[in-house]
Amino acid sequence: MRSRRPGLLVSLLAGAATVGALLTAAPAHAADPPLRDLADARGKVVGTAVTGSKLTGTYGEVAGREFNSLTPGNAMKWGSVEPVRGRHDWAEADRIVAFAEAHGQQVRGHTLVWHSQNPGWLTDGTWTRDELSAVLNDHIDTEVGRYKGRLAAWDVVNEPFEEDGTYRRTLWYDTLGPDYIAQALTRARAADPGADLYINDYNVEGVNAKSTALYDLVKSLKERGVPVDGVGLQAHLIVGQVPSTVRQNIQRFADLGVDVAITELDIRMQLPATEAKLAQQAADYRSVVSACAAVDRCTGVTVWGFTDSDSWIPDTFPGEGAATPYDENYAPKPAYHAIAQALGGGGGQPADGCTATYGVTGQWNTGFTGQVRISCAGASLASWKVSWTYGEGQRVSQAWNATCAQSGAVVTCGNAAWNGTVPDGGSVTFGFNASWSGSNGVPVVTLG
Ligand code: G2I
């Protein structure tokens, strides 16, 4: 949580928090290598957005240790680098690039052409088509030229589409027409032929009208010979709502002949965070990272801030937060371990990535209805079997969508003929009726 007006008390508390943070900043699991080692071994990026001024102390240690790529969260935006026309301020951007170079990390430039976080002189100006075109070219020449040869990729165009797949009405679109996109890409290629050039947007993670518009745009740009190397799927997601078509969507872009990067992953929840929400969030992180890991042309995943203390969510969505893999004191959350697993860490057990969750969905004086969900993220199943032991005399009388048998206190359920497959990122649920008396606690369910 950012303190807006730090008075003395707040400063003292912040000091205390820093001490706590130092104590909890040890690597996640003694056995886990840093995320960047896991990603390197698979030829993938695991990156984070960073704030340049924070790259010291624990924040700098974790950023340098765990990630092989950095994206400046704000420092390379037009409003940051040229607040006054012709007067540039590169201090924070330079600092991030220097930090990355010192730590053997890639840098993803973000972003050249956007409708937001532009300087007032640009947005308040009145521009002819030719004037604006020249201003855009000059901006790209200057910024891309400055970091030529040092950046792996640029988000050249950011958020060009509306939700329905029409072009977003912006200064760029309204003045230059849709070809501002081709112009920016062509200019960026000339300014740094070594950087991969991306179009980046949000709500394009699954197959939908907006991602299809992006797909059609990339297809036509490629047909015209306009340089475009990849698409960035931002992935600002909500716990429990990862689209089911992420992998399919990544694959269709890959099949088009461009790279795909998950560029701004965060998965927010209503606060307070509970264990159940954090577990769901971990499954969600696992499914996104696994979807990328499964497709060769998916270059990797960047999180939009690695700690909850450096996330845009609480300011923009009041009451929501806890969206990143580390908590506010730099303690890794279940989501961190899920990312590690999806990158091949965490022991690599075959059932890793699939879990069974038992719940009581209705209960009356002598009976109850229960449900078990088998979910996979980072793995899949061709068939399944779960079992649990009742400690309080419950007896299953009937089940649906599974074949169940009870012997003494032990209940064993296997898939029905039609629902043995649990895809990566998917789940299967079955239900049952049972009797109870006295108490009806939740048993531990074993999968496999
Ligand atoms: O909005 C989330 C992201 C969506 N995709 C493009 C990204 O560039 C964008 O990042 C966020 C930054 O993480 C925020 O930090 O972009 C926001 C602006 O749209 C950034 O917020 C701004 C605040 O609005 C300003 O008040 C603040 O001065 O961050 C600035 C620097 O801290």
Image (tube, rainbow, N blue to C red):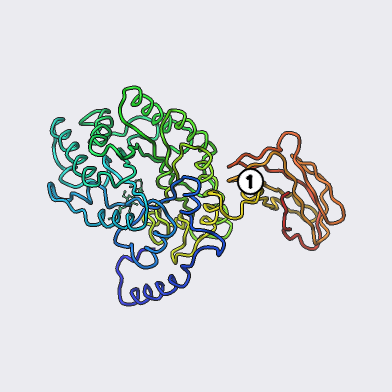
Q: Is residue 295 positioned above or below 13 on the image?
A: above
Element type at mark 1: strand
Q: Residues within 10 Å of mark 1 (few under 14, many from 20)?
A: many
Q: Is residue 251 positioned above or below 39 on the image?
A: above
The kind of residue on which mark 1 rests is: Ser
Please state which of residues 33 and 328 is positioned toward the viewer in this rendering.
33
Q: In which quarter of the image is the N terminus?
A: bottom left
Residue at x 18% of width, y 53% of height: 89
Residue tagged 1: 375
Q: Position of residue 19 (x, y in %)?
A: 41, 75
Q: Position of residue 325 (x, y in %)?
A: 48, 56
| Left or right of 3 on screen, residue 179 | left
Q: Is mark 1 within 8 Å of ligand 1?
A: no
| Left or right of 71 on screen, residue 239 | right
| Left or right of 366 on screen, residue 350 | left
Q: Where is residue 91 in the image (x, y as percent from the top left)?
A: 22, 57
Residue at x 61% of width, y 55% of height: 347
Residue at x 53% of width, y 49% of height: 343
Q: Position of residue 285 (x, y in %)?
A: 52, 49
Q: Is residue 182 positioned above or below 202 on the image?
A: above
